[in-house]
Image: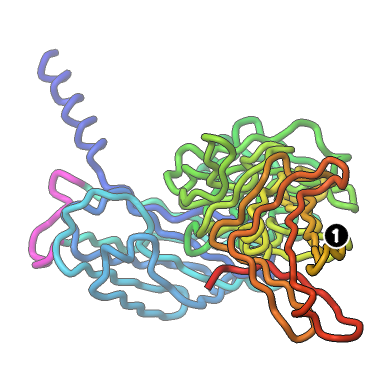
């Protein structure tokens, strides 16, 4: 009995040490392009990975095979050989890999043939070889390789995906439209790359467990990814998403928006952890993590604030966005207010008015009052624009004031900076006075 128990323990340990190589099972619409990742769970001790995938050419047309997220380890060579219904990739590292890491060796890209909605294509790992640098030692001794194939299942845009083919978890490809979709634990929705179309369900979604989020082709980069769109009328419950298992999503935030067509969209904002904005001692790495109404300072080098999330609006309605909006706020020392609405992602807005508020003759000088209003009121405290200068252009002449200070004026409802110009410096006749704030030379 003791020997039998020892054998069972050794067998279990051997199985636990197996290397897993796995292909995804994907649901999609006909006429689309899909990228199937080949995942390897442990790279340690390898120098060469050879994978052969067989597929049904009646359903799929091979487009390309490209390096996956482990490309930095298999950096010496990546070769592809193709014949009808079969493709082989060979990924080679410069030397035996010392690091134990999981990731994708390759992505196999296929076009799904139009009219294939009554078919499906198995994806068989027909050959898997994992070798060290000399290619003479059998690495499967004591550490067997456990390959798991996948499949591609095309379904029409008005079809139901409520039954399964096989027992593997499925990934619903970004851009797929279905009438009804039933997900099980471990199934995933693939994130749509920037500007892409999310998975769309027109009637009913069943998801008893948190939904796993699969990365877009090529992996995660900082940006915003649409995940799911469905009509509000079909909303039986609020879906939850499983993010913690992917280290690349350590700095991410989910959002939900509602469009004019009455559909809700769930999106994921992904950050590499670079600080974007700050309120007091709190630093935010994603825009959607900023609470509604919070007033924040946008930090230099915020990579995700180059788009529409960041904007300035003048009292006259003139708008700027992205990097230009950040420059305006930086020059004026202004801070952005976060606004969350049902019809779009979180917006950071700096609303202001800047201009010549008054002109008054004072003896032998002309006092020009510059006014700064933020929102509908003056800034709460005096503000010295250190490292900036105010430039008053009077006719063809320029008057430069270093580090101008704007002092709140309750009567005017703005912060004011008074600049006095000698009357002798003014040109004869009617002139236009323009004010500009810029970085000091």
Picture residue at 52% right of the left edge, 34% below the top: 281
Picture residue at 8% right of the left edge, 59% below the top: 137
Q: Does the magenta stretch include residue 78?
A: no
Q: Mark 1 points at which residue?
A: 357
Secondary structure state at the residue bearing disc 1:
strand
Give the magenta part as a residue range. Answer: 132-143
Q: Position of residue 17 (x, y in %)?
A: 22, 40
Q: Position of residue 391 (x, y in %)?
A: 68, 71
Q: In this view, does 227 lie to the left or right of 72?
A: right
Residue 12 seen: yes
Of residues 101 and 370, the one nearer the viewer is 370
Quadrant occupied by the N terminus: top left
Q: Which residue lies furthest to the front in this view?
A: 363
Q: Position of residue 34 (x, y in %)?
A: 57, 66
Q: Is residue 344 above or below residue 127?
A: above
Q: Position of residue 141 (x, y in %)?
A: 13, 48
Q: Is residue 134 magenta?
A: yes
Picture quadrant of residue 143? top left
Q: Is the magenta stretch mostly helix, strand or loop?
A: loop
Of residues 206 and 232, the one nearer the viewer is 232
């Amino acid at each position: 009995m003791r020997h039998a128990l020892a054998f069972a323990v050794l067998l279990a340990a051997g199985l636990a040490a197996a290397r897993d190589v796995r292909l995804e099972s994907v649901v999609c619409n006909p006429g689309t392009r899909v990228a199937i990742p080949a995942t390897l769970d442990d790279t340690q001790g390898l120098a060469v990975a050879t994978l052969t995938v067989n597929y049904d050419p009646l359903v799929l047309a091979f487009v390309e095979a490209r390096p996956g997220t482990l490309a930095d380890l298999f950096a010496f060579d990546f070769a592809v050989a193709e014949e009808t219904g079969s493709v082989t990739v060979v990924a080679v590292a410069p030397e035996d890999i010392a690091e134990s890491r999981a990731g994708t060796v390759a992505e196999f890209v296929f076009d799904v043939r139009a009219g294939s909605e009554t078919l499906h294509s198995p994806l068989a790992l027909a050959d898997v070889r994992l070798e060290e640098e000399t290619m003479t030692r059998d690495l499967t001794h004591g550490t067997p390789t456990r390959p798991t194939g996948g499949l591609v299942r095309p379904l029409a845009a008005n079809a139901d995906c409520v039954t399964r083919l096989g027992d593997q978890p499925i990934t619903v490809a970004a851009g797929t439209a279905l009438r009804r979709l039933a997900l099980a634990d471990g199934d995933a929705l693939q994130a749509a790359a920037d500007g892409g179309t999310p998975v769309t369900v027109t009637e009913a979604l069943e998801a008893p467990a948190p939904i796993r989020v699969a990365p877009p082709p090529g992996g995660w980069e900082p940006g915003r990814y649409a995940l799911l769109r469905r009509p509000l009328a079909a909303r039986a419950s609020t879906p939850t998403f499983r993010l913690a298992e992917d280290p690349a999503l350590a700095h991410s935030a989910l959002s939900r928006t509602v469009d004019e067509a009455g559909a809700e969209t769930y999106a994921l904002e992904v950050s590499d952890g670079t600080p974007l904005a700050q309120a007091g001692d709190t630093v935010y790495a994603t825009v959607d993590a900023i609470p509604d109404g919070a007033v924040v300072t946008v930090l230099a080098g915020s990579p995700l604030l180059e788009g529409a999330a960041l904007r300035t609006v003048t009292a006259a309605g003139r708008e700027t966005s992205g990097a230009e909006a950040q420059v305006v706020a930086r020059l004026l020392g202004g801070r952005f207010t976060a606004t969350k609405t049902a019809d779009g992602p979180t917006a950071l807005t700096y609303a202001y008015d800047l201009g010549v508020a008054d002109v008054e003759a004072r003896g032998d000088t002309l006092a020009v009052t510059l006014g700064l209003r933020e929102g509908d009121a003056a800034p709460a405290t005096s503000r010295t624009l250190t490292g900036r200068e105010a430039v008053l252009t009077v006719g063809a002449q320029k008057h430069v004031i270093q580090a101008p200070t704007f002092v709140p004026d309750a009567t005017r409802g703005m912060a004011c900076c008074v600049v006095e110009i000698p009357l002798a410096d003014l040109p004869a006749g009617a002139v236009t006075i323009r004010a500009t704030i810029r970085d000091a030379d």
